[in-house]
Image (cartoon, rainbow, N blue to C red):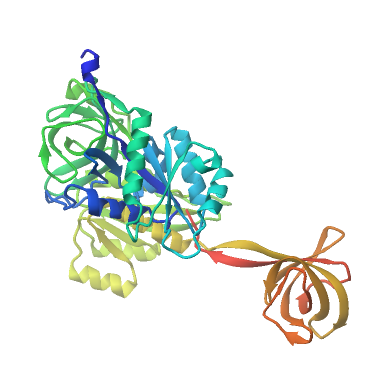
């Protein structure tokens, strides 16, 4: 194919939405989809969500990768960013920058794609966009009003405020980036989802990066290949060709490709087959080695066909196991039977099935043995459930929150199990029943807890900077005047994998 100016066309932008959990990524995508998608209704009888959709705004198409809630993008967020031309970083205008916000910024910068900030939830009281911009500046993300080049928009996904302005900013950024695609190149795309459909076989969703993809083309990835039998657009309607920037479902792969892989064009099936990466044999269940203090979630996986098991293994392998292990006792084809329940009971595990059946006798036995049996129609939902079960096994994380510092200025008396003392709050504020580290001459000498607080012989709820207060202190050290109390509390937080 020759490369000339006639084959260079403007590429519709592909947008990925990223940010901290609960900051409104899903709500924002839903608000855009409801008002601007050409036809949001799922059709074609395929149970798997496509993971991408297209809208039209001011007569121009925009593709969105529907990442929130998808296991593949939770585990491979960095790959999710690389497939896109523009990244929207959603930040809660009340809560501000969080750990996952920082992660998303790092991924976006690594992928070297332009960023657009959406300050979400501006309808809520307590919003402080300037404060959040200051937090972003500490992560080397400077918005235009802070002397940088990063566009930002205030939105409320809930109230559908600022959505037009956000889409205008996307088109402006796309124009500034001068997105182009060569339609004369051999087609290449990124796999963003793959599944097995009971009626249609393997279905892979990809976003096309360059070239024109047509029915009859041969595609290959490191783990899968096939000749395209049908192409479906995001609405489930059959199309004959797909242009760069568009997403589509591909029917014809001989097995599900791995999410995040690049799919490239081959002249012949044999050529694609010969370029497969050798897949290692299935691993035996993970064995806990000496010194490994992790807890494990044990599960038996049953599926309808062998190809389903391979797809499940691919997705399970992407789940982080640094903090808690995922031990698959057995991958097997067929319906769930009594022997599975007995094996799961012995291992204190669960049974996950993909498009398989459980007869009434087996259900009764599982209830009797208190073995959890879950049947799924979508592989990613199974992986999400595995993550949830792993989080239940994982002990909650204890986070320390520093509250205040106080200097001891008086020692009144010692009771049976406490000391009555006085102090002046140097910084911050605190309440009773908070925890204390006792420092003397900058050296930690003991720990304890503040049982009660008084001011002017009246019990009070809290002490703030500059105040002098009396306290009942319970601890493992005798307090002296001029000791420094570093006061904090501990919160149990749900663990993360």
Q: Position of residue 445 (x, y in %)?
A: 82, 64
Please determine whether, in this image, residue 142 is positioned above or below residue 289. above
Q: Nearer the viewer, residue 366 or 122?
A: 122
Q: Is residue 470 left or right of residue 42?
A: right
Q: Is residue 260 left or right of residue 333?
A: right
Q: Is residue 31 left or right of residue 294?
A: left
Task: Point out the image quarter for the N terminus.
Answer: top left
Residue 173's quadrant in the figure?
Answer: top left
- What residue appears at the point 19 percent right and 23 percent down from the top-left corner? 270
Whether residue 83 appears in this view of the structure is: no
- What residue appears at the point 42 percent right and 34 percent down from the top-left corner? 113
Residue 466's quadrant in the figure?
Answer: bottom right
Q: Position of residue 449 (x, y in %)?
A: 72, 74
Q: Position of residue 468 (x, y in %)?
A: 80, 75
Please determine whether, in this image, residue 464 is positioned above or below residue 45. below
Q: Is residue 12 left or right of residue 150?
A: left
Please determine whether, in this image, residue 229 is positioned above or below residue 95. above
């Amino acid at each position: 194919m020759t490369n000339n100016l006639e084959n260079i066309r403007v590429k519709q932008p592909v947008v990925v939405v990223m940010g901290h959990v609960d900051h409104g990524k899903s709500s924002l995508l839903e608000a855009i989809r409801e008002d601007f998608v050409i036809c949001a209704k799922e059709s074609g009888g395929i149970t798997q969500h496509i993971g991408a959709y297209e809208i039209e705004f001011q007569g121009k198409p925009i593709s969105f990768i529907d990442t929130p809630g998808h296991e593949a993008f939770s585990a491979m967020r960095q790959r999710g960013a690389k497939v896109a031309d523009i990244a929207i970083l959603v930040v809660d205008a009340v809560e501000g920058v969080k750990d996952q916000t920082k992660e998303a910024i790092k991924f976006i910068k690594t992928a070297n794609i332009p960023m657009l900030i959406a300050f979400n939830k501006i309808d809520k009281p307590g919003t402080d966009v300037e404060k959040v911009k200051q937090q972003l500046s500490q992560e080397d993300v400077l918005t235009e009003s802070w002397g940088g080049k990063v566009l930002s928009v205030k939105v409320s996904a809930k109230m559908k405020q600022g959505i037009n302005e956000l889409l205008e900013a996307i088109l402006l950024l796309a124009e500034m980036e001068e997105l182009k695609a060569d339609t004369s190149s051999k087609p290449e795309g990124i796999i963003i989802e793959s599944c097995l459909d009971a009626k249609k076989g393997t279905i892979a969703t990809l976003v096309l990066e360059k070239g024109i993809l047509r029915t009859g083309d041969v595609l290959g990835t490191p783990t899968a290949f096939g000749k395209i039998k049908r192409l479906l657009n995001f609405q489930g309607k059959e199309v004959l060709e797909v242009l760069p920037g568009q997403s589509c479902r591909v029917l014809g792969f001989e097995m599900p490709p791995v999410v995040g892989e690049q799919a490239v064009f081959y002249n012949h099936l044999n050529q694609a087959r010969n370029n497969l990466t050798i897949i290692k044999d299935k691993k035996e269940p993970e064995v806990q080695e000496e010194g490994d203090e992790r807890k494990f979630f044990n599960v038996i996986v049953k599926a309808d066909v062998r190809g389903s098991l391979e797809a499940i293994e691919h997705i399970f392998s992407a789940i982080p196991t640094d903090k808690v292990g995922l031990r698959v006792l057995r991958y097997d084809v067929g319906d769930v039977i009594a022997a599975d329940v007995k094996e799961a009971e012995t291992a204190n595990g669960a049974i996950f099935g993909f498009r398989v059946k459980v007869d009434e006798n087996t259900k009764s036995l599982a209830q009797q043995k208190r073995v959890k049996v879950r049947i799924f129609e979508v592989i990613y939902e199974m992986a999400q459930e595995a993550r949830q079960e792993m989080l239940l096994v994982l002990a909650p994380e204890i986070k320390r929150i520093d509250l205040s510092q106080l200097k001891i200025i008086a020692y009144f008396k010692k009771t049976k199990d406490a000391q009555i003392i006085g102090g002046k709050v140097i910084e911050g504020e605190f309440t009773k029943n908070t925890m204390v580290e006792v420092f003397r001459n900058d050296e930690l000498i003991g720990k304890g807890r503040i049982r009660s607080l008084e001011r002017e012989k009246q019990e009070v709820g809290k002490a703030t900077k500059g105040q002098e207060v009396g306290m009942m202190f319970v601890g493992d050290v005798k307090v002296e005047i001029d000791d420094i109390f570093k006061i904090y509390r501990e919160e149990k937080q749900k663990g993360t994998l």
